[in-house]
């Protein structure tokens, strides 16, 4: 029987900070890497072109459109004739290096067409000089043994690949999907500020709903954080791939996008979102080399700030790995219901 090709599908926009590391690692397991670039201006395209396994396609959309970019990646992958295993992996995600020795890798390659592959998502952090991780509570359907099934994606956090309800599911226990999204904490905070603004505008999500979802990774108990197993990165490091350093930036492209939201809708529209933990005047100067035409003053009222302090103080009950405290959480929910009546 013909061995299926392993095809990596990766959307990119200004990921130069980690893209070379990602492509070195992905080149060890993928036969083909499809990178869909959406107007990167930081050298990401040039990095991608240096890797022989990469097919670079253009995402010309001016807007953030998750369904369109996922569909384009899938369509390009299906131009490859024959059996194939599709792995939809973002540029800040890495298969754990124990795929090199784990029998689970053969199980993935040999899985029947139509199989969905669910990976445990491990969030990797740099705590002092050590690498640590914590698990996301649900597995991520990031793999699919292609059988031509239709794909429907309607939102930001929908499945990355076809995931038919009837499909058999393979859930590796040894091979993980390491997510480096929090490795540069400032970058992560910039990213979730933008997500909150974007979803507040596009899908009209309430400020409390956005806060509870996007802050759940920041207030988890220390008991859920573990040292990163050596075997998860050893195989990469033995090939000379640096899996621990990070190049930090003074600002990120998400900052520029948030500033555009402020300009288009007015900063006051976002006053109830958790986006005021940074100096927007300073960021504007960094990005535009000039002072803003009008100071980007914090539009929050004293009451808005009070509510956000309360949200922060109670967020542990919504965070990943939080202890089960039904009585306390119920009391918080009653407060939230009251706040929603006045726009929260």
Image (cartoon, grey):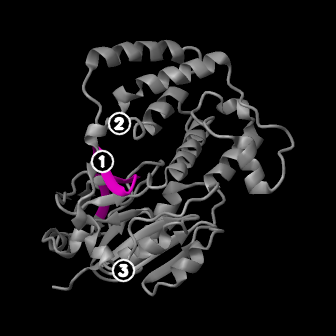
Left of 176 or right of it: where is 67?
right
Circles 1 and 2, Cβ within 8 Å, touching? The answer is: yes
* Residue drawn at 58 percent across, 67 percent down: 59
Image quarter in which the C terminus is found:
top right
Q: Which residues are magenta?
A: 123-143
Q: Which residue is mark 3?
A: 240
Under circle 1, the secondary element is: strand
Residue 206, which numbered label? none
| Residue 135 pos. (x, y %) | 28, 48
| Residue 214 pos. (x, y %) | 46, 39
State the separation of the CA atoms marked 3 and 1.
25 Å
Q: Earlier in the sequence, mark 1 or mark 2?
A: 1
Under circle 3, the secondary element is: loop
Q: Which residue is mark 2?
A: 220
Q: Which residue is mark 1?
A: 134
Residue 93 lies in quadrant? bottom left
Q: Is residue 214 visible?
A: yes
State the separation of the CA atoms marked 1 and 2.
9 Å
Q: Earlier in the sequence, mark 3 or mark 2?
A: 2
Q: Residue furthest front?
A: 129
* Residue 24 lies within the magenta run: no
Left of 20 or right of it: where is 115?
left
Q: Is residue 162 visible?
A: no
């Amino acid at each position: 029987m013909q061995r299926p090709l392993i095809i990596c599908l990766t959307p990119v926009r200004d990921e130069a900070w980690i893209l070379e590391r990602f492509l070195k690692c992905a080149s060890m397991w993928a036969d083909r890497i499809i990178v869909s670039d959406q107007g990167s201006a930081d050298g990401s395209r040039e990095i991608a072109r240096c890797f022989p396994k990469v097919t670079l396609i253009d995402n010309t959309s001016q807007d953030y459109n998750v369904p369109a970019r996922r569909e384009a990646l899938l369509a390009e992958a299906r131009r490859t004739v024959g059996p194939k295993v599709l792995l939809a992996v973002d540029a800040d995600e890495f298969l754990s290096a124990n795929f090199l020795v784990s029998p689970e890798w053969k199980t993935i390659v040999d899985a029947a067409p139509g199989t969905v592959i669910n990976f445990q998502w491990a969030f990797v952090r740099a705590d002092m000089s050590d690498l640590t991780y914590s698990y996301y509570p649900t597995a991520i359907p990031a793999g699919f043994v292609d059988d031509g099934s239709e794909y429907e994606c309607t939102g930001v956090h929908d499945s990355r690949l076809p995931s038919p309800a009837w499909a058999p599911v393979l859930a590796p226990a040894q091979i993980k999907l390491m997510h480096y999204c929090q490795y540069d904490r400032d970058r992560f905070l910039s990213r979730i500020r933008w997500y909150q603004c974007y979803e507040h505008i596009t899908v009209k999500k309430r400020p409390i709903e956005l806060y509870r979802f996007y802050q759940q990774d920041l207030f988890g108990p220390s008991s859920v954080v573990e040292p990163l197993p050596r075997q998860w990165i050893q195989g990469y490091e033995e090939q000379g791939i640096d899996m621990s350093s990070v190049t930090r930036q003074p600002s990120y492209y998400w900052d520029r996008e948030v500033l555009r939201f402020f300009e288009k809708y007015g900063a006051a529209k976002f006053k109830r979102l958790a986006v005021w933990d940074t100096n927007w005047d300073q960021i504007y100067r960094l990005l535009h080399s000039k002072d803003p035409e009008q100071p980007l003053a914090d539009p929050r009222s004293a009451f808005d700030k009070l509510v956000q302090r309360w949200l922060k103080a109670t967020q542990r009950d919504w965070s990943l790995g939080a202890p089960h405290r039904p009585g306390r959480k119920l009391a918080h929910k009653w407060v939230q219901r009251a706040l929603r009546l006045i726009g929260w």
